[in-house]
Image: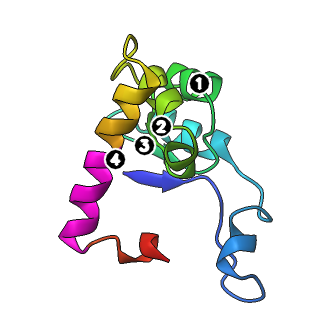
Amino acid sequence: FVVHARSGILTGLDPRANRRVPPLHHEFVHRLASDRPHLQVTVNGGIGNCAEVAAHRSHGVDIMIGRWALKAPWDVAIATGVAPHDSRGIILNAYQQYCEHELSSGRERNLLR
């Protein structure tokens, strides 16, 4: 189960404001994972550095990374153990190939805006 740690306000806030105004409640997601150990829980929302990745993993939850991956793909690669010894150029090249593949699939048209 992917659980977003931020409640969406459906009236009165635009999508951008919804990403920063409602508070994050990572502790709710951690408690869900603790109370339901038979479920695979993935936390989403507000994860933006290596320390936060480690903190969430210490609570036994998987992580979903969004905007951080767009802003600093090399940090994400290091934090997730995908390419800890590769240079930023190698990581960026691999990320560009991934993005091109995703964009050509037609699923992420909103990224072109």
Disc 2 marks a residue whose amino acid type is Pro
Disc 4 marks a residue whose amino acid type is Gln
Element assignment for label 4:
helix
Disc 1 marks a residue whose amino acid type is Cys
Dots 4, 2 in contact, CB < 8 A: no
State which region is magenta.
96-106
Task: Please indicate whether residue 63 sits to the left or right of residue 91 in the image.
Answer: right
Element assignment for label 2:
helix
Element assignment for label 3:
strand
The quarter of the displayed image where residue 20 is located: bottom right
Mark 1 nearby-residue class (10 Å; few <14, some 14–19, many ≥20): some
Q: Distance between the residues labelled 3 and 2?
A: 20 Å
Q: How far apart are marks 4 and 2 (CA)?
A: 10 Å
Dots 3, 2 in contact, CB < 8 A: no
Counting from the top left corner in percent of width and height, residue 18 is at 70, 71
What residue is pinned by disc 2? 73
The answer to whether residue 39 shows anywhere in this view is: no
What residue is pinned by disc 1? 50
Dots 3, 1 in contact, CB < 8 A: no
What residue is pinned by disc 4? 96
**Residue mark closest to the camera, 2 vs 1:** 2
Q: Is residue 109 above or below residue 71?
A: below
Counting from the top left corner in percent of width and height, residue 9 is at 70, 77
The quarter of the displayed image where residue 80 is located: top left
What residue is pinned by disc 3? 42
Q: Looking at the picture, tell me which residue is in the foreground, 62 or 100.
A: 100
**Residue mark closest to the camera, 4 vs 1:** 4
Residue at coordinates 41% horizontally, 28% vertically from top-left?
89
Q: How far apart are marks 2 and 1 (CA)?
A: 12 Å
Disc 3 marks a residue whose amino acid type is Thr
